[in-house]
Amino acid sequence: MKKLLMICSWALLLGGCKSESGPSDPDGDKPVPPPPSAELLQKIEDLNAGLVSLKALAEAVSRSEVRALAEAEGSVLLTFRDGTQITVACDAEAAAAPLVGIAADGDVYYWTLAAEKDTPWLKDAAGAKMPVSGPVPVMGRDDKGFWTVTTDAAATPWQIVNAAGNPIETTGDERVALFRSVTAGDGKVEILLVDGGTLSAAQVNDLSAAGTANCYVVPAPGKYVFNAKVRGNGAGEGVGFEPAISLTDGMTADWLWTDSEGLVSDVAFDKTSGDISLTVGDGRGNALVALMEDGVIVWSWHVWVTDAPQTMTYKNGTVFMDRNLGAVGTTVGGTDAYGMYYQWGRKDPFYGGKKAEASANAFLEAKNGTILNPAYPALGWAFSKSTTTTAGAAANPMTFYNNTVGTGYNWLASPNPKLWGESKTLNDPCPPGYKVPKTDAWEDMSAGRQYIDGVSVWDGANYGMTYTHEGQTAWYPAQGYRNYSSGAIVGLRASTGGSGAYWSVEASSVKSYHLFFRSKLSSGTGSINIELDKERSYGYTVRCCEE
């Protein structure tokens, strides 16, 4: 990394500096210049701020990776994995100015004065080269109107001179920007300096830059990080968890399962930054990544590798994703449009499949369609005829729970209708910016539980429903569901056409509401209900909408 920091001469006109108490300058008899203008003083201030940024950048790129870039007018905010944030003010039209630079001598970087030939090291009052890790030089203007540099608070300002040994006058016409541009690509960030030199840093893509969540969409191969210090989006009261995750020395991270060979690798936890990092390979699919303490799962995140989902605005203004949560495509009638299944109120996905299952072979599709991390031989898809706590569910994200609770069935021993809510909670399974919808988000799909011609149409040939609004269409596959009593997939491509079941956030005391649809009955009547209530231990699909 450090080899990339070598910077060429900053301004070919500059040669060194001399003390104001030294030999008289050739222009010493010229009239005393007028006081500096406010504009020139601002330029000097900007130049010194740029030198501070230059030092910070030189140090940051040698020890850390860039995790996020945020562009603003004339500047770019760089956020590094170690938490350092630096604003780089860019000027694409800037020309060379009387600047201080940096260059390497062995493995150490020192401040320089730009020169026409050899690198002239900027030295402090004691005559020693100034490492970049030390004080930042301060640029100024003396009472004769010449550029000066100060190497420390106690030093006398020195005039900057050109290659001929003459001091350089401040004209007010200088463009004092140090940085020309910041670009990102191919896993690195390059900061182009005004003189043509560059600073280069490795880049990782921050999945949580737009906010933390339990699911992250990854549209392309590469190196990624996300904030593992927060459960979900960290919001919601009474959901059974503290938002913050207490980090300990014994914590590690790894992938638990994936439905595509080699989809995720190199999963690691960095306690200093609180990040989980991972590499995503080619292909499309889903994976579960977990933070663990002494082998026990503390929290897990769904890595959803798919083309960036598109959105569609429905008649009532709700903005939905174009696909089920976990789906890798939107093909009408295609299994690529199938997503994951979720028990109401749980954040973790249960793998679906292309076939229905009998109770005796529940999760056969998951076992055949996923790859489990061999480093954890106890891992496995399972059904448990029992209830658990929210902590127990988080620690066992691959176990499908169900048992009798009061007058209904639940995976949670003490039913909690707040686990998902109208405002997104930390248990919500959707990616940043999205949430599980309310039932009224689908209100214009049905009239008295009937399909609406030209709006909501059952497609018996392709097993699903098409919703149309203002020329746009959304495909809802009849993906069936996981039965609460066994965890087996049912209602998928049945002789009657199958059924679709999509959770909403709304809940009664013991059940929760969902969108349900299936083929028209033999009588010709429709069968669509936007607020059917069922036990929360069912595994239904989720179609996320914008928050």
Image (spheres, helix red, strand yellow):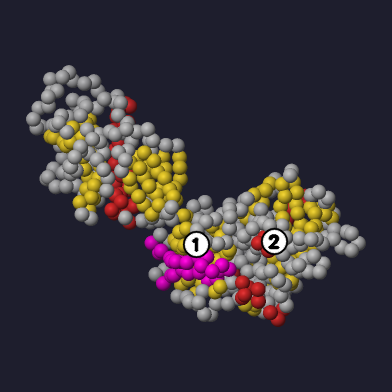
Q: Which mark is residue 334?
A: 2
Q: Residue at x 17, y 18 (%)?
A: 31
Q: Is residue 328 visible?
A: yes
Amino acid type at circle 2 is Gly
Left or right: residue 276 versus residue 48 is right
Magenta: main secondary structure: strand
229 relative position to 145: left or right: right
Q: Nearer the viewer, residue 414 or 276?
A: 276
Mark 2–mark 1 Cα distance, whole angstroms, equals: 25 Å
Q: Amino acid at mark 1?
A: Val
Q: Which residue is mark 1?
A: 280
Give the crowd class for mark 2: few <14, some 14-19, many >=20 residues within 10 Å: few
Is residue 305 or residue 51 the one in the foreground? 305
Instruction: Indicate whether residue 448 is drawn in magenta.
Output: no
Q: Where 161 falls versus 211 (above or below)? A: above
Q: Looking at the rendering, which quadrant does residue 147 occupy?
A: top left
Q: Magenta residues, as a range?
A: 250-272
Q: Is residue 258 magenta?
A: yes
Task: Identify the image quadrant of the N terminus.
Answer: bottom left
- Residue 121 spot, x, y in % from top left: 18, 44
